[in-house]
Image (cartoon, rainbow, N blue to C red):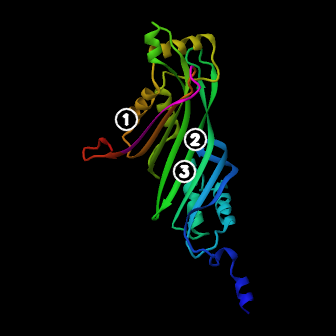
Amino acid sequence: MARGNARTVPTQDRAPTVQQSINKVGIEGLRTSIKVMRDGELFTYLSKIDILVDLSENKKGIHMSRLVESINESITLKAGRTKTSLETLGAEVLMELTRRHPFKSAEITISTTLVLERSTPISKRPTYESYDVVAKVTWSENTLRKYLETSVIGNTLCPHSLEVTGGKAHIQRCELKLGFDVKIDEDLLFEKLIEICELSFSSPTFTVLKTVDEAHLVEQMFANPMFVEDVSRHCLDRVLGLGIEGSVLIKATSFESIHKHDAVAEIRRHLKKNKSGSIDVL
């Protein structure tokens, strides 16, 4: 009789041998297509999704299929349920999961590539530039927050070598990662984060460059030499201009052309509005 009763209880809901709670358990690396409609334009992303929840000490495991079902249900474009951003989708997945699986805290991370149409600086040729982006939505104490992150490649030119050689310098590609943790309803777009990053380099980079464009970028770099430290500081200065509360991560990585190692500079700050409405850096 006892055996029969045990079989009626799903294995996941039985007590584990070692009764300890788990902070995060779930799935990582689920690849799927996501459609987002913004300003009348449909964007399609091939994305990688991680979704994790906490687990109490008296449950042997989670119901993995319910996590996937919540994703599949939410990514379906239905009338009146069009997603306007990746984080909107993430929030909907977690809301759907509340109806399928018990948890106190949860998170979903959507990683993909955003492709934007650009024009070269002088010849104005069309070019399509790709940017790695991450949208993470967290659920804790019945509150949703989002973390948006982008990685952008630009150029830097060394101020020190420019000075000691009398006008010559080594240049390198530099990756700038900018992440912002804010309230779920904060109006913040990946395009704005990308713009901030590209303005923080000695010069941006382009997939397509004609001769006049190449000359322009080289002249721009020599007129605007920067250490990797300068890149991260300039990025923070532009972030402060957004007037948004939250936590910011800035990491600049210079792929050094005259060294066998990389140079990095990282800034983490908490931004809070004061009584006058301006931003304090904590």
Disc 2 packing (10 Å; few <14; some 14–19; many ≥20): many
Measured as percent of width and height from the top left, residue 120 is found at: 59, 20
Dot 2 or dot 1: first in sequence order is 2
Q: Is residue 84 visible?
A: no
Report the Cα–Cα distance between label 2 and label 1.
Answer: 21 Å
Q: Residue furthest front?
A: 260
Q: Main secondary structure of the magenta part?
A: strand
Quick check: marks 2 and 3 in contact, CB under 8 Å? no
- Dot 1 falls on a residue whose secondary structure is loop
Disc 1 packing (10 Å; few <14; some 14–19; many ≥20): few
Quick check: marks 1 and 3 in contact, CB under 8 Å? no
- Dot 2 falls on a residue whose secondary structure is strand
Measured as percent of width and height from the top left, residue 157 is found at: 50, 18
Magenta extent: 258-270
| Residue of label 3 | 136
Q: Residue furthest left?
A: 276
Measured as percent of width and height from the top left, residue 249 is found at: 46, 41
Say left or right for 270 vs 212.
left
When asked about the image quadrant of residue 78, the answer is bottom right
| Residue type highlighted by circle 1 | Gly
| Residue of label 2 | 133
| Residue of label 1 | 241
